Image (cartoon, rainbow, N blue to C red):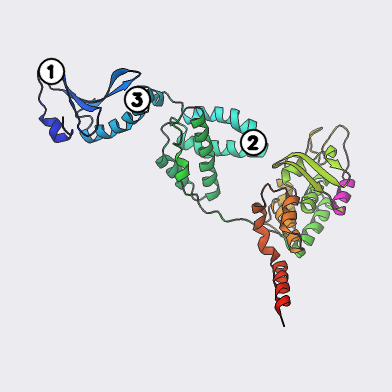
Amino acid sequence: MQRLTKRTVDKISPTGADHFVWDQQLPGFGVRVSPKGQKSFLIQYRHQGRTQRMRLGRLGLITADEARRKARILLGPAEDGKNPALVISSKRNAPKLSDISERFIEEHVMTRLKPRTQANYRAILKNYLLPALGHKRITEITLADLSALHTSISHKPSQANRSVLVMSKILNLCEQWGLRTMGSNPCKHIQLFKEKPRNRFLDKTELKRLWNTLDEAYADGTAGLYAINAYKLLILTGCRLGEIQTLKWSFIRGNRVEFPDSKTGYKRLPLNAAAMKILEQTPKQVGNPYVICGEREGAHIVNLQKSWRRIRKKAGLDDLRIHDLRHTFASQAVMNGTPLALVSKLLGHAKITTTMRYAHLADSELLEASEGIGELLRD
């Protein structure tokens, strides 16, 4: 026995019959020499009490070093009681990402995620993951593949990061489904891009201007009453857009609203007097359970973006997103002295760490508290 290298393998001569030469450093790795001198690398292992061999490739098509690396990878499963031949076969027959995506949508996206998140996942699959990796078998997707994909969308850091996170979920599920080796998910090695947070919120002057513009927009027909009242409720409650769009009259109990299934589950929110007044001014439609009614009979409003673009332009607030109304509600609450813990409850955040983005706005209250300590120690 000797270490199989290019030099040692070249020196092996045929003997007139098949014979094997085994590597002295890697047990189970060897070369088979035919009577005519043709040499092929192979591995030998025991599975379920029987000795089995697996061909790695013929000398000339594969080098000794390549064969050694391949043997080392395949002999690992054999030591764990697995059959390397079946491992290779399962990899060759593994489904492609394009096939797995259908199961992913059916068993995870549609059953565990909210409608808006479902739409986001579908968009990421359609626009990024499937075009780049859909043709690859799920066992063939590597860190290099994911790194290349992530880098190719670097001009859209948010989408690039979300693509990696969705892919990570797919690969984790594939491990659970027995389609990939446990712990083989390479997404954990991808360093996500830094994303610039968008914390745009209105100051008191801008907020007043927007409110007046909403009244003018209804008067001149820029937007309908239901759309106008939706924007006003967003300002007055800090709710998410989807919560106001799908708000039902049955959710309103006195001066509070109870969402049975918001983004973070059940959510109970007090309604201030101004919000109650907007609700009183919102006409109910017979047979329609929603507060903000849409064009279709019995349905809620669907598209608030078109009228919003007209309104924000009219108000001179072209950079303001609808979601920024939620930031405005939170920011004004913090600046008015509301503790972050209460603001977190008003917003329906699952974790108060999410609310901490507004902590810097409470500097005046923190300074006042600090000065109080100073007063105690002052002569």
Q: Mark 2 points at which residue?
A: 113
Q: Tell me, yes or no, whether the highlighted magenta stretch contains residue 332.
A: no
**Marks 3/2: CA–CA distance:** 38 Å
The image quarter in which residue 13 lies: top left
Compared to residue 172, the image places residue 312 above or below, namely below
Q: Looking at the picture, tell me which residue is in the foreground, 262 or 276.
A: 262
Q: x, y percentage for residue 165?
A: 53, 42
Asked if residue 321 can be seen in this view, the reply is yes
Q: Tell me, yes or no, whether the highlighted magenta stretch contains residue 282.
A: yes
Q: Residue 155 carries which label?
A: none
Query: Viewed as shown, does residue 358 lie left or right of 258?
Result: left
Q: Name the residue under label 3.
A: 84
Identity, as a three-letter code, of the amino acid under mark 2:
Leu
- Neighbour class for label 3 at 10 Å: few (<14), some, many (≥20)? many
Q: Is mark 3 on a helix, strand or loop?
A: helix
Q: What element carries label 2?
A: loop
The image quarter in which residue 36 lies: top left
Where the C terminus falls, by quadrant?
bottom right
**Marks 2/1: CA–CA distance:** 63 Å
Decide: marks 3, 2 in contact (CB < 8 A)?
Answer: no
Q: x, y percentage for residue 37?
A: 12, 22
Q: Which residue is drawn at 34% across and 25% down?
A: 84
| Segment tinted magenta in the rendering | 273-284
Query: Viewed as shown, does residue 60 lie left or right of 184?
Result: left
Q: x, y percentage for residue 223?
A: 79, 48
Of the numbered discs 2 and 1, the one sitting upstream in the chain is 1
Q: How many marks?
A: 3
Identity, as a three-letter code, of the amino acid under mark 1:
Pro
Decide: marks 1, 3 in contact (CB < 8 A)?
Answer: no
Of the numbered discs 1 and 3, the one sitting upstream in the chain is 1
- Neighbour class for label 1 at 10 Å: few (<14), some, many (≥20)? some
